[in-house]
């Protein structure tokens, strides 16, 4: 039994790894993957349909010059309904699902319109 396990261990050293170093090595995500939404402010008319559609009440319409959606990522389940229902196609999905979305405090998961539009970084410098 010990010899059998030893042989198996030796063989494993020379076989390709079936795991990867996460998150340093990102996953290969399909094109239809639903990650963090991106907002195109030039298309958004502040109608609030995305907020009314969201089953988790994760979206609030806030004033940021004009009216735009803000997103509580802590409540979002990435169902994509807000994207599907937007009459202006102002929201789209990205492949962002880790890193920028991992925060210690819930209030840091409240993404402003500027953050959703990527006008400001999703993570502050030095923020863990
Ligand atoms: S993102 Fe779309 S649905 Fe949401 S407020 Fe803007 S235009 Fe309306
Ligand atoms: S993806 Fe779904 S849960 Fe997330 S904000 Fe849009 S509608 Fe709400």
Image: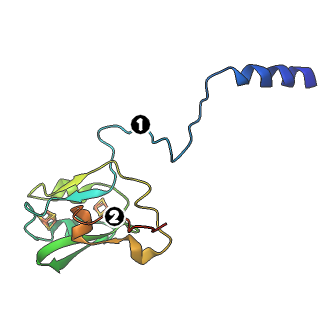
Above or below 7: residue 36:
below
- What x and y, as percent, mark residue 41? 12, 64
Answer few, some or many: residues within 10 Å of disc 2's Cα (few below 14, many 20 plus, some between 14 and 19).
Answer: some
**The CB of the residue at mark 1 lies under 8 Å from ligand 2:** no
- What x and y, as percent, mark residue 44? 10, 64
Q: Residue at x 36, y 64 (%)?
A: 76
Above or below 16: residue 79:
below
Check disc 2 and report the residue beneath it.
122
Structural distance between the alpha carbons of marks 1 and 2: 22 Å
**If the picture is divided into quarters, which one holds ligand 2?**
bottom left
* Closer-to-camera residue (15/50): 15
* Closer-to-camera residue (33/98): 98
In the picture, residue 12 is in which quadrant?
Answer: top right
Answer few, some or many: residues within 10 Å of disc 1's Cα (few below 14, many 20 plus, some between 14 and 19).
Answer: few
- What x and y, as percent, mark residue 87? 9, 58
Specify the quadrant that holds the N terminus.
Answer: top right
In the picture, the disc for residue 120 is none
Check disc 1 and report the residue beneath it.
28
């Amino acid at each position: 039994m010990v010899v059998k396990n030893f042989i198996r261990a030796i063989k494993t050293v020379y076989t390709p790894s079936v795991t990867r170093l996460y998150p340093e090595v990102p996953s290969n995500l399909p094109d239809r993957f639903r990650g963090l939404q991106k907002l195109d402010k030039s298309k958004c008319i502040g109608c609030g349909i995305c907020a009314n559609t969201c089953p988790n009440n994760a979206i609030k319409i806030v004033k940021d010059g004009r009216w735009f959606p803000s997103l509580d990522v802590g409540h979002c389940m990435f169902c994509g309904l807000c994207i599907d229902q937007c009459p202006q196609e102002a929201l789209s999905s990205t492949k962002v699902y880790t890193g920028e979305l991992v925060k210690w405090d819930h209030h840091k998961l409240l993404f402003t319109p500027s953050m959703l539009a990527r006008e400001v970084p999703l993570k502050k410098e030095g923020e863990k």
